[in-house]
Image (cartoon, rainbow, N blue to C red):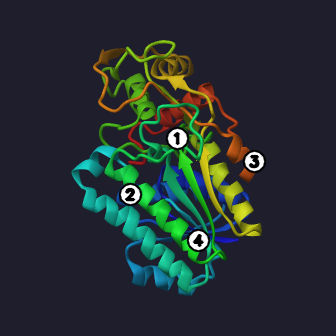
Amino acid sequence: MIVLVTGGAGYIGSHTCLALLKEGHKLIVVDNLCSSSMDSIKRVEKISKKSIYFYKVDINNKNELNNIFKKHTIDAVIHFAGLKILSKSIQNPIDYYKANVAGSIILAEVMNKFNCKKLVFSSSASVYGDSLKVPICEDFPLKPQNPYARSKLVSENFFQDVFNSDPSWSIALLRYFNPVGAHKSGLIGEDSVGIPTNLMPYISQVAFGLRQNLSIFGNDYDTHDGTGVRDYIHVEDIARAHVNSLRVLETTSQLLKINLGTGKGYSVLDVVKAFEKASGRQIPYKFLKRRYGDVDKCFTNPELASQKIKWEAKYGIDEMCEDAWRWQLMNPSGYN
């Protein structure tokens, strides 16, 4: 298949591009590079020994998208493009709705025009909000707590309405839990610019000596060690889920809503200990007050992914930490 990947230069996008190339698909990547690097595409090409058509284009630019669809006969789209930092979405909701919602609408409009109706959408487990029960299943109430999460849910609802209006569409909405790790080569990984907003890259920088210590928000949760428990999943497992989803969409017209996680919860201290083991270095940390809205435990039930797209996570926390550490060692300043 000829697959268009929006946001393909990003963290999950680049790993998915590599998985798609290994599966034999031909790729076109559209990315405005606002929070990613062209180097990731070059490294994907280096690892795979295959070439990618790349366009530095914002998905809100309908004319440019039209030109790309005119130039290439595109069979399917995997849609990663968007903004993703929770705190910035609170500060700049207009930017987030424009990128994440308006961009999705424009993309679907152009796809429909060119009769390209197979889509895998990068959503988020944040659409569930503060779920009171675990493991989280796909039929749980959706209660997003911030503009980023709401923009993902609005996009999901939009794509569902598109499907309901025209069942010839085939759409998978993939809700990720906590992507971590990097490719085994150490050539592509999570390129955190400035202070990391996610746990694993922050721990990596502390282990490397770029930061003095790790701040852990809360040690009084109802968990086995008092720190919050989350479902961390290897980015290569997530990439493989997109390939499997595309395979299913290729043969049948349907709308899928699927959680992507291991089904296991790891606490912050579990991750710290695993990273100390992987790096051979001590991770100094300090406890701060818990943050408003943080829940004790958050992990998924992965059974639907197994049923619908024949997928399950392969990697555990040790491999996630080993691969993240390799990326940090080989790329102390990220792609720069």
Q: Is disc 2 surrounded by few (<14), some (14 to 19) or many (20+) residues within 10 Å?
A: many
Please name whichever residue, 116 or 6, is drawn nearer the observer in this view of the structure.
116
* Residue 274 x/y as whole percent: 55, 20
Residue appearing at x 54%, y 87% in the figure: 70
Q: Earlier in the sequence, mark 3 or mark 1?
A: 1
Q: Nearer the viewer, mark 4 or mark 2?
A: 4
Whole-number angstrom distance, CA of label 3 to CA of label 1: 18 Å
* Residue 144 x/y as whole percent: 40, 47
Task: Look at label 3 and name its amino acid.
Answer: Gln
Whole-number angstrom distance, CA of label 1 to CA of label 2: 16 Å
Task: Look at label 2 and name its amino acid.
Answer: Ser
Q: Earlier in the sequence, mark 3 or mark 4?
A: 4
Q: Earlier in the sequence, mark 4 or mark 1?
A: 4
* Residue 23 x/y as whole percent: 73, 59
Whole-number angstrom distance, CA of label 3 to CA of label 2: 28 Å
Q: Is residue 13 visible?
A: yes
Please determine whether, in this image, residue 76 is positioned above or below residue 112: above
Q: Which residue is mark 2?
A: 151
Please determine whether, in this image, residue 8 is positioned above or below residue 162: above
Q: Which residue is mark 3?
A: 307
Q: Are marks 1 and 2 in contact (CB under 8 Å)?
A: no
Task: Look at label 4 and name its amino acid.
Answer: Phe
Whole-number angstrom distance, CA of label 4 to CA of label 1: 24 Å
Q: Nearer the viewer, mark 1 or mark 2?
A: 2
Please determine whether, in this image, residue 109 is positioned above or below residue 263: below
Q: Is disc 4 surrounded by few (<14), some (14 to 19) or many (20+) residues within 10 Å?
A: some
Describe residue 62's horizontal placement relative to residue 46 as left or right: left
Which quadrant of the view contains residue 319?
top right
Q: Which residue is mark 1?
A: 177
Q: Are marks 3 and 4 in contact (CB under 8 Å)?
A: no
Residue 163's mark? 4
